[in-house]
Image (cartoon, rainbow, N blue to C red):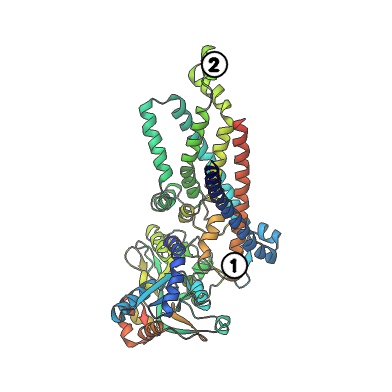
């Protein structure tokens, strides 16, 4: 009996340690980013760093303003949400409520595949097809632009939005819908007036998850957005927070490198905020 | 894109690199770290060296700045840089040995009718003073200026030679030579620059002031947009036997054929 208890405690201990390792990693990364990111912000000045519009990290008189990156990330993410959410949402309603079983299997499979495509492949296809396409379609000198990045991001966030929305729609109690149908509402009316409002915090969580994915994506947008540190314009070449870190990191040195860590810290704070929002919505959808 | 693979590789290899450094002290391997522009040259040299001496050779393509940093911190035997060392780096106890010169080709799309520009005109294009191909004898289309990211050795070389430091108005800042070539080959109005060794089909190299970039014109100095390939070593640390052998090999006359094979121009 005693032996068994000891064994139980031992196993508990192991699980606890494994759990703590994960927490440890999060703390370690957070701590590292803060320690690595603060010095440059101090040296540059937080206002100058966040609100200066000029980034020229290797110039003889360097300027480290990341406002263009912040705005580009915000606009790019917003654009991806505007394009991606309606499509993802409609798809999820269709799959959860309307689609025949066979079509549902096929479409769900396709959505899962979409989620499994590596981002570098999105970037490559974007670079070879989308960028020249935008150049020709809009008669602009170069297609690598915020618009190209928005389109790529919108496609990339579809799977997360669809999967989470489906789960939310399916969690709506059957009785709600039956009651609505019994009162004479048509199926489509029922879905939009009853099921969707009942699932709305789950759907909000899906949107926040999409925002999180879009703001953190680096590889694919780096290949289609042109990477010049301009203030964002739909048809202009732009640089995101993520790509600002990724594109200059390998050759950077001194204050430039420290500033890149500071950008990563800013990005990290953004993602923390988004995660907090996600938790908030998920909690509400459970209640 | 290539760089990302490199980053990922570098991360996974970080552990083995540590192990590699220890091994190199016993005389088993030579580790080099640095310029991505030197990839082709150093790859061929490394292969020839391994074959000749049976000593294994590693190359970590991280960029000139990182390579110089790595040799300074003793994380590799020899650093590779595609620019001359700065005064402060030399003051830090590093020294440089030029093994070759590399021409930086100015490239346009093959459909572009412009085929010759002088350095001054190229500088004006990159500074945004000339914005349309028709101003320099081409078709009526806006010039799409493609360059490399801040910190790149190629960008540093190009901008210092053309006198456009800090003044370039880039439409796109790409992170690898391959990306620049792909982008220029896809856009008829684009202009870019890339290491001469890497320029192949799909793009057209412009002649500069009437001189086409080639091994001969880089060697005799008549093609002006060129930069050195440099081995970086630490003054106060002696090279291991293996690293010394590698150093002697790449600076010998024997190495010249391999360097030319890679498209760069040997100094010896």
Mark 1 or 2, closer to the camera: 2
Which chain does tag 2 point to?
A: A
Where is residue A4? Give x, y as percent: 52, 43
Drawn side of residue A204 relative to residue B147, left or right: right
Which residue is drawn at the image coordinates 40% and 58% (left, top)?
Answer: B187
Which residue is drawn at the image coordinates 69% and 61% (left, top)?
Answer: A48
Of A286 and A92, nearer the camera is A286
Q: Callout 1: helix, strand or loop?
A: helix
**Would you say the residues marked 1 and 2 are in contact, meaning their CB atoms lie under 8 Å apart?**
no
Residue A180 badge: 2
Which residue is drawn at the image coordinates 51% and 60% (left, top)?
Answer: A246
Q: Would residue B263 be seen by someone viewing this image from the given angle?
A: no
Look at the picture and state if A54 lies above or below B51.
above
Mark closer to the chain start, 1 or 2: 2
Residue A198 badge: none
Q: Would residue B178 be seen by someone viewing this image from the given angle?
A: yes
Which chain does tag 1 point to?
A: A
Where is residue A122? Give x, y as percent: 42, 49
Where is residue B234? Give x, y as percent: 50, 83
Of B268 and A272, nearer the camera is A272
Question: Circle 1 sits on which residue?
Answer: A256
Look at the picture and state if B156 lies above or below B235.
above
Drawn side of residue B165 relative to residue B182, left or right: right
Q: Callout 2: helix, strand or loop?
A: helix
Q: In which quarter of the image is residue B53?
A: bottom left
Of A241 and B18, nearer the camera is B18
């Amino acid at each position: 009996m005693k032996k068994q208890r000891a064994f139980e405690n031992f196993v508990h201990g192991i699980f606890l340690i494994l759990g703590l390792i994960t927490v440890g990693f999060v703390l370690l990364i957070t701590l590292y980013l803060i320690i690595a990111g603060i010095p440059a912000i101090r040296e540059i000045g937080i206002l100058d760093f966040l609100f200066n519009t000029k980034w020229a990290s290797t110039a003889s008189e360097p300027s480290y303003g990341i406002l263009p990156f912040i705005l580009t990330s915000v606009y790019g993410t917003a654009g991806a949400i505007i394009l991606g959410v309606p499509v993802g949402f409609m798809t999820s309603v269709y799959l959860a409520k309307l689609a025949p079983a066979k079509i549902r299997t096929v479409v769900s499979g396709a959505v899962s595949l979409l989620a499994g495509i590596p981002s570098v492949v999105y970037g490559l296809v974007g670079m070879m097809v989308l960028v020249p396409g935008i150049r020709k379609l809009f008669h602009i000198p170069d297609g690598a632009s915020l618009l190209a990045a928005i389109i790529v991001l919108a496609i990339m966030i579809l799977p997360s939005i669809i999967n989470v929305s489906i789960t939310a729609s399916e969690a709506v109690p059957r009785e709600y819908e039956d009651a609505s149908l019994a009162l004479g509402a048509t199926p489509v009316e029922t879905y939009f007036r009853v099921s969707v409002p009942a699932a709305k915090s789950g759907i909000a969580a899906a949107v926040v998850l999409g925002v999180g994915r879009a703001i953190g994506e680096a590889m694919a947008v780096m290949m289609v957005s042109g990477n010049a540190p301009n203030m964002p314009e739909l048809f202009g070449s732009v640089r995101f927070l993520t790509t600002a870190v990724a594109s200059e990191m390998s050759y950077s040195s001194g204050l430039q490198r420290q500033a890149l860590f500071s950008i990563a810290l800013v990005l990290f704070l953004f993602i923390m905020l988004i995660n907090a929002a996600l938790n908030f919505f998920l909690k509400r959808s459970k209640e | 894109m290539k760089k990302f693979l490199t980053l990922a590789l570098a991360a996974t290899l970080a552990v083995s690199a540590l192990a590699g450094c220890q091994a190199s002290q016993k005389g088993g391997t030579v580790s080099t770290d640095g310029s991505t522009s030197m990839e082709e040259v150093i790859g061929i040299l490394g292969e020839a060296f391994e074959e000749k001496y049976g000593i294994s050779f590693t190359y970590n393509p991280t960029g000139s700045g990182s390579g110089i940093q790595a040799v300074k911190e003793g994380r590799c035997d020899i650093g590779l840089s595609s620019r001359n060392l700065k005064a402060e780096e030399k003051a830090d106890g590093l020294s440089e040995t030029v093994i070759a010169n590399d021409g930086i080709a100015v490239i346009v799309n093959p459909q572009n009718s412009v085929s010759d520009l002088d350095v001054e005109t190229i500088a004006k294009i990159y500074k945004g003073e000339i914005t349309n191909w028709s101003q320099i004898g081409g078709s009526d289309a806006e010039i799409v200026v493609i360059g490399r990211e801040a910190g790149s050795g190629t960008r540093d070389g190009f901008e210092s030679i053309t006198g456009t430091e800090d003044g370039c108005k880039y439409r796109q800042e790409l992170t690898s030579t391959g990306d620049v070539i792909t982008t220029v080959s896809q856009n008829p109005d684009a202009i870019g620059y890339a290491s001469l060794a890497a320029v192949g089909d799909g793009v057209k190299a412009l002649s500069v002031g009437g001189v086409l970039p080639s091994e001969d014109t880089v060697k005799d100095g008549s093609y002006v947009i060129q930069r050195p390939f440099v081995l970086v070593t630490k003054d106060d640390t002696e090279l291991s036997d293996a690293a010394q052998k590698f150093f002697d090999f790449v600076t010998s006359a024997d190495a010249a054929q391999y360097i030319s094979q890679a498209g760069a121009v040997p100094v010896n």
